[in-house]
Image (cartoon, rainbow, N blue to C red):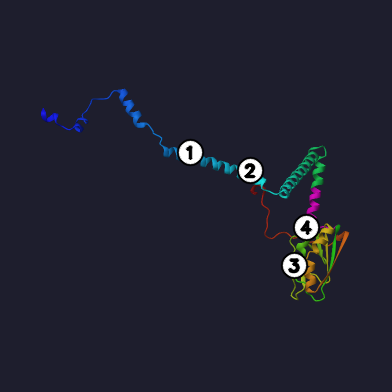
Amino acid sequence: MEERATRPPRFRRLRRTGTPTVQQARQRLLALGRFRLGRGPLVAALLLALLGVGLVAQVRVTDEAGLDQLRQTELVALLDDATNRVLSLQEEVRTLEADRARLQGSQGDEAAARAAQERLESYQILAGLVPVRGPGITMHVYDPGAVVTQTMLLDGIQELRDAGAEAIQIGGVRVVASSWVGTDPDGRLTIDGRLILPPYTIVAIGDSHTLAGAMAIPGGFTDSLRGAGASVTVTEAPAVQVEALHEARPPRYAQPVPAEQTP
């Protein structure tokens, strides 16, 4: 008995005190699950919150500053562009509605036939199958030294197309989308394999002022010809005529895709 009484206090604290009650177990669990918020975590949470607010404000400022940072002239240009697009779309809507009204009316068949005929005539002009007449220009190229090359002539055709020429004739040859410029064994110029001889006469139908202005661009077709030693005259006219026709040939390689296979 004396030996048990002389044990240190730390051994007495380890004695089992019995099974805790339900209320005591709940209190111990609550004590273990308590989260004590210290000063460090509180400061970190505050800094994170401030950082989030700053990022949101920066995004909003960036989104709203797109138009605010533009100059007045740039804003006017954007407004004009938007207005022109709206007017163009409105005009297209009116045209489509008028076409629909004609086709749905009592004269729908007649209107459809007329539209098909207009489309056919347009294709015939582009393909060079019919003679055409309209405003345009006539160019005479004098080349006594034979300095005009196929590259120069090809550049001239391309410049006329870029300027809006709807029909082009060089010499007695009608120039169409499939036309090509080459030379014969003697070095003379050919178009679609047909020989053309100087002085070259080039007739183009389109807006005469625009076509003439395109031919007068520094470094362009006429400037290159004059620099090489040839001479060129350009004449505007309210009406010129393209009489040469292009012989249509069936394509050798390209074939139309059936409608059900169209992507």
Q: Earlier in the sequence, mark 4 or mark 1?
A: 1
Please give left or right for residue 19 compared with residue 202 in the image: left
Q: CA distance from mark 3 to mark 4?
A: 17 Å
User: Viewer-nearest of labels 1 and 2?
Assistant: 1
Residue 38's place in the image compared with 159, above or below, is: above
Q: Earlier in the sequence, mark 2 or mark 3?
A: 2
What amino acid is at disc 4? Ala
Element class at badge 2: helix
Q: Earlier in the sequence, mark 3 or mark 4?
A: 4
* Magenta-drawn segment: 116-132
**How many discs appear?**
4
Element class at badge 4: helix
Question: In the rendering, which numbered label is found on residue 46?
Answer: 1
User: Viewer-nearest of labels 3 and 4?
Assistant: 3
> Callout 2: 10 Å neighbours few (<14), some, many (20+)?
few
Q: CA distance from mark 4 to mark 1?
A: 76 Å
The residue identified by callout 3 is 181
Q: Closest to the observer: 182 or 9? A: 9
Element class at badge 1: helix
Q: Earlier in the sequence, mark 4 or mark 2?
A: 2
Q: Earlier in the sequence, mark 3 or mark 1?
A: 1
The residue identified by callout 4 is 127
Q: CA distance from mark 4 to mark 2?
A: 53 Å
Q: CA distance from mark 2 to mark 3?
A: 56 Å
Which quadrant does the N terminus fall into? Answer: top left
Residue 81's place in the image compared with 27, above or below, is: below
User: Viewer-nearest of labels 4 and 1?
Assistant: 1
